[in-house]
Structures are given as structure tokens and as C-alpha cells.
Amino acid sequence: MTDVARPVAVVTNLEDPTADLVVAELHDRGVPVVRFDSGDFPATLSCSASIGGEQTRWGGSIATPTRVAELSAIRSLYYRRPSGFTFPHLDEQDARFAVAQARYGLGGIVTSLPDCLYVNHPNRIGDAEYKPAGLAAAAASGFNVPPTLITNRPDDARAFIKQHERVIFKPLSVPLYLRDGVSQTVTVAEVTADEIDDAVAGSMHLFQARIDKDADVRVTVIGERIFAVRIDCDLLDWRTDYTTHTYSVIETPPPVARAIFAYLRHFGLVFGAFDFALKRDEWTFIECNPSGQWAWMEPPTGLPMTAALADLLERGTHATR
């Protein structure tokens, strides 16, 4: 089968403007695209696949109302932010059973496509989303990692804060949390020892020495290409207010670039959105989001990130290192 006939699969929710940009770029290039969301199953998304006997790889197809893609023909899969399986017409117990069958059935097939480049593979995304694993990989890759404590022991938290004086608290994960129907989040904030009480014992918490920084850096890695943007603002966490930012393109120092690719190889990723704190010439690793946003930085910087991602998806397995 020629590459012209091989589609790119884009797995994300309907309201994903970042994916919209990539899909539009691929369409302009004449690259076929099949886009679907796991939340569409089974109402408007179907799949049938077979293996065994002389057939050693999954064969079959996945279909939306407007597209049918042969599993063996998918050249690359862009896994963004699908909404997840839901079965609202079933009672709680039956829905839980149906979600499990969909996750391990359809989800298992989607993660087992032959000759497909994943950007990124869902299982590798899951591995990399664990902050303790990311910090360990960052230290092993050669990054400068700030002193960090993950604990549910109040005394250890107080001792850590007293040792490092200026310490921030950040969540290990941010699941959906509604209050009066409005989505809430936990912001990154500085914490003092006298704010630590016995409630810390109720779960795990992440405390990290605050970095004295001049600016932040967001580094978006797409295949072999690195796009580094300096973000100047006066906020502890620049993600809380995008209206205060000034953006400028900067070069990534070779040692940082080597550590970046070592980190990506560790997790089997081909895309990553890295955050660093910058103090003069010193880059301090904060985190890497394997599904991070990047499109908002393209207009103010002129960096061709949409084109780079389309290049990667268009080349498919030919783009692997």
C-alpha cells in the first residue's frame, strides 16, 4: 500500500483546537486523516479486528460516520486528549463492566497497531505522567532537578520546608474536581512549615524547593526537532495567567538537549513538552508533559510547530530514531 493511501489517526475529543490545526495541515498536504474520540464508542464509532492462524498481526478496521480505516494501513497515530468511554444508558454496574471491555478491547487494539508511529503511545504516556517516575528519569538523564519530597508524613514535610526555607506545594495529579458544577484546580503555591497539619497524613503530597529564577522555558520536542521558548512573567506558575507573558525564541544548550533525548528514550516518547526554570545560564528541570500544549506559542514566536508535527505524522514509522 502506498503512503498516499495510509491514513493518520487522530485520537482526541471534539473540542481540541490544537488537534484541529494539525488535522487542517495534514488535509492541506493531501494526507488522509481519520479522527475519533473514545467517547464516541459505541454510538458513532465501531471496530472489528482479528488475529490468529496465519494472521500474525491485527487486521480489521475502525469506522466513524465518515471514515473507515484499515488497522494495518494506519501510518501514525496522534494520541491527544480523548474524553474516555462512557455508557450513560446503562446502570452503574453494567456501565463499569462495559467500560472495562471497551478499554481493554478497543483500547488494546488501538495500542497494538502494526507499523504505526505513535505520538505518543498511550501506555508510554501513562508511564511518563507519574511525577515520581519523571523526576527519577530526569535526574538519571542528567538534568538539574530541584530538591523534592513526596510524603504523607507531616513531620517530614515540616523538616523539608525548614531545611530549604522557600518551598512550593504542587499536586501529583489533577483529576476532575467539581464544586457547584465548576471545575476546580490546585495551584502551585509556596507553603510554610506552620501550614502543615495532620491532614498531610491523608494522602501523598509533593513539596519542592522553590527555584530562584529569571524566567521560565517551555521546550517542545517533536521527533528530532526542539523548539525552545523563553517565557518572561512575574508569576510563580506562568500557567495561571497567560496575559502577562512575553515570549522569545532561545537556543537549547547541547547538554540540555542531550538530556532531553535521553529522557524521551527512557519513556519511549517522540513528543514531549518540557518545563524549565532559568537562572542566568542554568536550566532546572520542572516537569515533562507527554501530551502538553504548544499551539498557543506558535503565533507570537513564528515557530513552525504545526508543520513539524504534521511532518512527523506524515512520515510515520520512517521518522523513528
Image (spheres, rainbow, N blue to C red):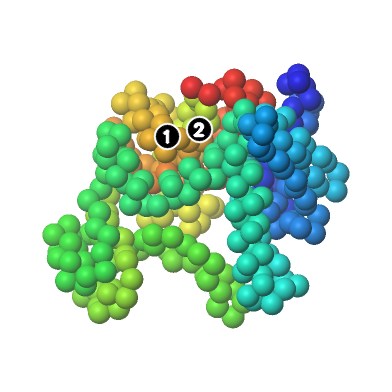
Instruction: Identify whether 80 is placed above or below 187.
Output: above
Q: Secondary structure at mark 2?
A: loop
**Residue assigned mark 1:** 264
Q: Nearer the viewer, residue 302 or 194?
A: 194
Dot 2 surroundings within 10 Å: few (below 14), some, or many (20 or more)? many
Q: Nearer the viewer, residue 2 or 167?
A: 2
Q: Does the image show residue 210?
A: yes
User: Residue at the spot x=43%, y=60% of the render?
Assistant: 173
Q: Residue furthest front?
A: 53
Q: Residue furthest right?
A: 66
Residue type pointed to by label 2? Val
Q: Nearer the viewer, residue 174 or 276?
A: 174
**Residue assigned mark 2:** 270
Q: Do residues under tags 2 and 1 come within 8 Å of each other at their CB atoms? A: yes
Instruction: List x then y, in percent, for residue 147.
Output: 22, 51
Instruction: List x then y, in percent, for residue 266.
Output: 38, 35
Q: Quadrant of residue 42?
A: bottom right
Q: Nearer the viewer, residue 241 or 90?
A: 90
Instruction: List x then y, in percent, for residue 13.
Output: 68, 53
Instruction: List x then y, in percent, for residue 273.
Output: 48, 40
Q: Quadrant of residue 264?
A: top left
User: Residue at the spot x=54%, y=52% of the render?
Assistant: 243
Instruction: Identify whether 159 is placed above or below 59.
Output: below
Q: Secondary structure at mark 1?
A: helix
Left or right: where 279 falls relative to 177: left
Query: Reading the chain from its start, which is encountered first: label 2 or label 1?
Result: 1
Q: Does the image show residue 24?
A: no
Residue type pointed to by label 1? Leu
Q: How far apart in space, not on screen, are marks 2 and 1 (Cα)?
A: 7 Å
Left or right: where 2 falls relative to 106: right
Q: Look at the image and tell me in which quarter the N terminus lies.
A: top right
